[in-house]
Image (cartoon, grey):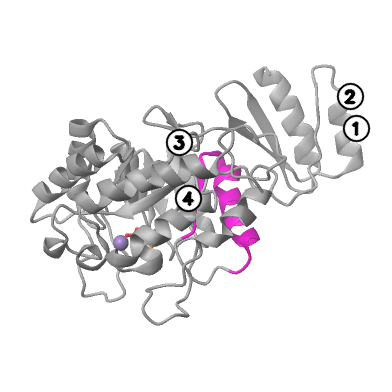
Amino acid sequence: MTQEQLNEIKEITAEFGCKIQPVKGAHRTIYALLGEEREKIMINRILGLDYIDRFDAIDSPYKLMDIHSELKNHKIVLGGHIVGESPFIVAGQCTIDPKNPNYFIETAHAVKEAGAKAIRGGVWKPRTMPYSFQGDDASIKTLVEAREQTGLPIDTEVMDEHQLEVALEAEVDILQIGTRNALNYSLLKKIGQRNAHSSTSVLLKRTRTMGPVSELIAAAEYIAAGGNPNVILCPRGTIPTMEGYRNHPDESITPLLKEKTWAPIIVDPSHSVGRAKYVAGASLAAIAYGADGLIIESHVDPKRGIGDDPKQALTPEELTKLIKNINLIWESTRIDNKVPA
Ligand code: PEP
Ligand code: MN
């Protein structure tokens, strides 16, 4: 579409209080209409333009994230892998320790060796107490160094606009929105806008208090409507109901999400169960439920880690064994790469 044609459409939609949001894919661009898009007169005027090929009115409240939307064949590519074609494992430390950055670099090499396809590392941390270690801007350099040395994409959580800008400057591949910000709509909008038309992905966690699956998909819609459809959904456990687990494991919502959205699902078993000894079982269950991947905390020496690492992190040996078993469950549960309903 030419700029003049786009302007003509924008003028028409503006009369009806609607906005046009381009969502650029690898092969074509979709122009999503935001606002009261069912206005008959407006639709007829748009359809009357000779360069208009199609106008789809989508019934679902998720115009972009719905399984039947125009983006239904959209693929998220990270480090040369299409997420969902094989188990996509993100692994690494909960927190990068600025006093011991070498642990992080060693962990990055070890998780790559174990079979991980991306590296996670918390530069900034959401902590319950304001006196606990909150993270350090300087650790972004350690994260980038890990990518340079291993060639794997990197993931880190951002909680505010300053952190977002630092992460964008470093060209972080996966921006993580944690459980505490999963319903922070202004941040979700901002992330979508600042990454519009880029290949950066967003790993959106489910909030601890998240009710129906629709709430998680609606939160993803904010990011996509901002201009970036590369959203991965991440169940990570909800308010704990069972003594012993840090949260209530929720990998079982994976098939429910898959019925409603095309978005890939990467489950976080580490925060869900919160203990290294339960992580393997939760991981295999998630893969059997149809998850496209997992984000797993791992550390070369968990007891020397900070943040969640002493409790939750797997050693590289444990991770290596787990990834082998993940591949077995994947192979035995997929037909044509899909889990049978
Ligand atoms: C994390 O990934 O280390 C983290 C803080 O996750 P969540 O937002 O799920 O608690
Ligand atoms: Mn953690």
Residue at mark 2 to residue at mark 1: CA–CA distance? 6 Å
Q: Is mark 4 within 8 Å of ligand 1?
A: no
Q: Is residue 271 visible?
A: yes
- From the image, tell me which residue sits under label 2: 48
Check contact, mark 2 vs mark 1: CB within 8 A. Answer: yes
- From the image, tell me which residue sits under label 1: 44
Going by the picture, which residue comes out furthest to the bottom?
243
Q: For the magenta stretch, what is the residue range?
A: 211-235
Residue at mark 1 to residue at mark 4: CA–CA distance? 46 Å
Mark 4: few/some/many CA within 10 Å (<14, 14-19, 20+): many
Residue 274 vs 68, above or below: the answer is below
- Mark 4 or mark 3, which has the lower sequence index? 3
The residue mark sitting in front, 1 or 4, is 4
Estimate the x, y position of residue 325 in percent, counting from the top left.
Answer: 37, 47
Give amino acid for label 1: Asn
Query: For residue 228: magenta?
Result: yes
